[in-house]
Amino acid sequence: MSVKVSDIGEKELVKYIIANSKDITPDDTAILPVNDFNLISTCDMLIQSRHFPENMSYFEMGFKAVTVNVSDLAAMGSKPIGFLLSIALYRDLEVDSFKEIIGGVLDACEYYSIPLIGGDTNEASEIIISGTALGLCDRPLMKDTYGKDDLICITGDIGLAALGFNLNTSDNIYVEKALKPKARIKEGQILKEHGATSATDISDGLASELYEIKKEGFGFMIHEELLGISDEYKKLANSLNLDYLDLILHVGEDFELLFTISKDNLDKLPIDFKVIGVVTDSDVVEITLENGSVEEIKNKGYEHYVSK
Amino acid sequence: MSVKVSDIGEKELVKYIIANSKDITPDDTAILPVNDFNLISTCDMLIQSRHFPENMSYFEMGFKAVTVNVSDLAAMGSKPIGFLLSIALYRDLEVDSFKEIIGGVLDACEYYSIPLIGGDTNEASEIIISGTALGLCDRPLMKDTYGKDDLICITGDIGLAALGFNLNTSDNIYVEKALKPKARIKEGQILKEHGATSATDISDGLASELYEIKKEGFGFMIHEELLGISDEYKKLANSLNLDYLDLILHVGEDFELLFTISKDNLDKLPIDFKVIGVVTDSDVVEITLENGSVEEIKNKGYEHYVSK
């Protein structure tokens, strides 16, 4: 019987590509040494039925397409220099909706100080927005260059988008984060300058990212009480019959940065962040729950919220 | 009544984006001055139902996705430095077919000496391959920097792919060109070094490209007898009830370079090429037919062969 791509999953497909290309850096972006600096580049494709919730506006679709790409630059501590846009639209889309998408793209480009330098338009059966973000960086911040006892930290709050995808209301921080996430581009550059030992962005959920950055012989101990989960969050999740910890660990789409730093460099860090755990040599990804018990965090892998 | 994107067409959509972004160079690629050189970047998305004929193999799809992007670098005279791949697949695609696509991408990357440096995989209802090609260039060859009396030339042959799309046979130069076109990356660099005054690649048909590079006050006179149309070509087109000149002027997908050069620099050019016309100040795009009559070439615009 023939094996289908859905049988093996996206991560295995990516692994196959990496294994067959001698030039791919398995990190958040590609890194190309050019003269005396590094050209940082990354591309991400967003597909309407898969990445855009039904209540997302056209403007927000455009904004998000920039955010997901710029977020990868942020994870490297890179300065953005240019954005390329390939967009496919269905024939019956209203021109005004197209203009709203482009408005969102341009607004995001201005927000991140990354010029829209080129692109391509196309026709498809649904909206597809493929972006490429380009940046420069002297010493890119890799995702797995941490050491034992480094502290594991995140910028901002985690899990807000995960909850937002499940709420029908609007005008709250959860839905705002789900529909219009922001990349931490300035924070990434500050982290690089202030001694962070590694960084990646949280696009696929905290658990998935921890497994993504895990290297042999190292483990992570996360502490639930450090995750900053509010009572409101727990209550809202509960009212939706959702497990709040599941939302926080396994959904993602926050585009916050997950980074590591030594205790010594922590005090000097001029950004908002939370310490959520520590790098260990246990070779296990685990969490100390609020009740004191320790559990292994499972690598459920990323499942897009709309493909349920 | 609301206006749909299909009512105004792709070219108008692109014009809207360019008019609203202050940072887009309206040429084959984006040009970003970085330190003492120019970073050249371009992205192009290929969609199965729109860009891949039914008899195209998975390997050829992958190869073509690289070619269409590298061809834009070729038109600038740029040296390629990296390729990024965003690919979306449908769930039931066999893993072996996926591997063939990647094989085609990697084979093309090797052929053009452009390393595959990164990418992204996704799920969609059909195969979508979005590529980004990156290159370097000291003095990019622009598409409209020609002068009056410059000669209009093309690399290789024109119209072969156009005929190939209509043939059911295989193993002939027409179908080969339709299914596995090659970008003229070396020729582009040679043209830049040997005094070509402008260049663009023929992706959208000769007529469409001539209108694309036309600037006010300048015109082009093409000579049919210089296009190198063989008797076999005319006969095959005729047997298919197709107008051979229509195929040559209005289909494209050849990925040959259309360039201009002064008479003085012509003899020193170490590549295969054909002079097909001359830059005039007539402000009209016209052709002298084999029978001696002169006709204006219409700008029919690009229509993908599969969208008929």
Image (cartoon, coloured by chain):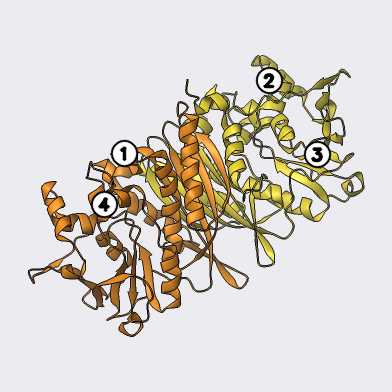
Chain colours: A yellow, B orange
The disc at residue A153 is: 3
- Asked which secondary structure carries label 1, the reply is loop
Locate the C terminus of chain A by quadrant: top right
Could you tell me how far apart the alpha carbons at marks 3 and 4 are, in whole angstroms? Answer: 59 Å
- Asked which secondary structure carries label 3, the reply is strand
First-in-chain label (3 vs 2) = 3
Could you tell me how far apart the alpha carbons at marks 1 and 4 are, in whole angstroms? Answer: 13 Å
Which of discs 2 and 4 lies nearer the camera? The answer is 4
Look at label 3 and name its amino acid: Cys
The disc at residue B174 is: 4
- Asked which secondary structure carries label 2, the reply is helix
The disc at residue A236 is: 2
Could you tell me how far apart the alpha carbons at marks 1 and 2 are, in whole angstroms? Answer: 53 Å
Look at label 2 and name its amino acid: Leu
In this rendering, is residue B294 above or below B125?
below
Residue at mark 1: B55
Identify which residue is drawn at 61% across, 31% down: A175
